[in-house]
Amino acid sequence: MKLGKISSIISAAAFMTMTAGATVYNTGYSVSTNGANQLVDNLWTVTSVVNPPGGSSFPSIPYPAFVLPAPTITWPWDTSAAPLGAPNSLTTTWDTFQLPAFGGSDTVGVATTYTLNFNAAVGSYNIYFESDNYLDMYLGAVTLANRFYTEPATAPGDFLGWKNTTVNVASAGANQLNIVVYNFPFPQGNYTGLRVNFGDPVPEPSSMALAAGGLAALVAAIKRRKQ
């Protein structure tokens, strides 16, 4: 077998090893239908709703976040795919704490906490997100993002801007991500929503260099054996 072909096989194997076991935690990535024929998110959960709209009733907290797929979104939310460079290219859907039927007149604003319990390897993760109207983000007790707006303050309802931040996971295994979304009041009925896109950790430069060095050494050893 030629050295070039051997090198290609090794490179492919190394890539498969580095990407094996990847998990996606996007909103709307894992969806099921409940007994009332409503779409719910199997990964993200609503764990707190403060000052819910008057006249609306809500299930007991916590409960699954409701999913608003692109064809049914009536609010002018962004329905584009995650930006180039995101952990994957899936078009994530918006999660909300309200069913469309809830409607209601939100005269005081709402703070909704979306919670994700997940397992992760040690490493850096890029998290892309959009929200109505702004959010705080926490990994355990660590603040990741504070007062991130994803719409212009002068044009409420224009949720057309992905934001991103990086989180460093220091402890492998169980982790909890909490995103508190703050929604502005709107007298004609109002939804609040969240989109999140993240998954594979960002390879550390030192890890990439180590992998490249190991691959080069292996190719050199094979070459010596053939001489």
Image (cartoon, rainbow, N blue to C red):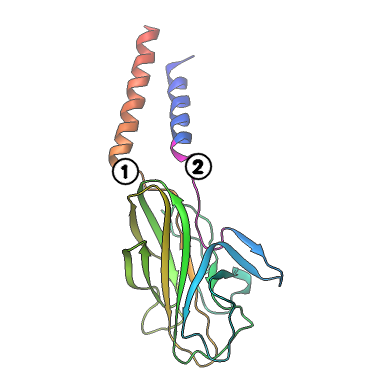
Q: Is residue 21 a member of the stretch shown in magenta?
A: yes
Residue at 58% in and 87% down:
56
* Residue 21: % across, % down: 50, 42
| Mark 1 secondary-structure assignment | loop
- Counting every numbered tag in the picture gives 2
The front one of 40 and 187 is 40
**Mark 2 or mark 1, whichever is nearer to me:** 2
* Residue 33: % across, % down: 68, 65
Mark 2, other Cα within 10 Å: few <14 / some 14–19 / many ≥20: few
Q: Which mark is residue 21?
A: 2
Q: Residue furthest top?
A: 227
Q: Give, as a single range, the part of the protein colored magenta.
A: 18-29
Left or right for 34, reference 169: right
* Residue 101: % across, % down: 64, 82
Residue at 42% in and 68% down:
179
Answer above or below: position of 123 versus 47. Answer: above
Answer above or below: position of 207 versus 166. Answer: above
* Residue 12: % across, % down: 47, 31
Q: Which residue is mark 1?
A: 204
Identify which amino acid the numbered label 2 is placed on: Gly
Label 2 – label 1 distance at C-alpha:
17 Å
Answer above or below: position of 10 versus 136. Answer: above
| Mark 2 secondary-structure assignment | loop
Identify which amino acid the numbered label 1 is placed on: Glu
Mark 1, other Cα within 10 Å: few <14 / some 14–19 / many ≥20: few
Residue at 52% in and 78% down:
76
The secondary structure making up most of the magenta span is: loop
Residue 70 location, quadrant: bottom right
